[in-house]
Amino acid sequence: MSINTQFINAVIDNQLLWGLAEKNGDGFLVCDSSEYEDTDVMPLWDSEQQAASHCTDEWSEYSPVSIDLEQFLEFWVSDLNDDGVLVGVQWQLDGECPEYDPIELAKAFAEQESD
């Protein structure tokens, strides 16, 4: 399964990904995987607006936070991988959301940047 090219290109163009962090500073949002039992997923978006649109209801205590692409590739990918956390690309609350191994996402960025 290939990763959303629009997402990859937008992140590369802006050099940012967006996640949701707790307003009280306790960390980033992870939720249960819809594909794998006992697995967490960190939702990611390619824009602040997309991320902000999810800060309602049970996620109202979160706000969009940018993650520098270089930092994500250098530090986050290995930490997420070590913790067994998948990434959800362009996460949607109602519908199928693709979930990827963080290393798979990093490879997609590298492949697109080399083209």
Image (spheres, helix red, strand yellow):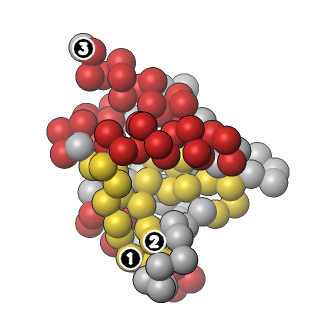
Q: Which mark is residue 63?
A: 1
Q: What residue is rendered at 19% in x and 45% in y?
A: 14
Tell whether 41 sits left or right of 109.
right
Please, which residue is most extreme toward the left here? 13
Where residue 32 appears, as percent x and y from the top left, is 69, 60
Pick whichever, 71 or 110, lies toward us: 71
Residue 13 in which image quadrant: top left
Pick whichever, 103 or 8, lies toward us: 103
Q: Residue type at mark 3: give it.
A: Asp
Q: Are marks 1 and 2 in contact (CB under 8 Å)?
A: yes
Question: Which numbered disc flags the more N-terminal residue, 3 or 2?
Answer: 2
Question: Which numbered disc flags the more N-terminal residue, 3 or 1?
Answer: 1
Q: Which residue is mark 3?
A: 115
Tell whether 41 sits left or right of 36.
left
Q: Report how far apart the C-alphas of labels 3 and 1 lie in the structure.
A: 34 Å
Q: Residue type at mark 1: give it.
A: Ser
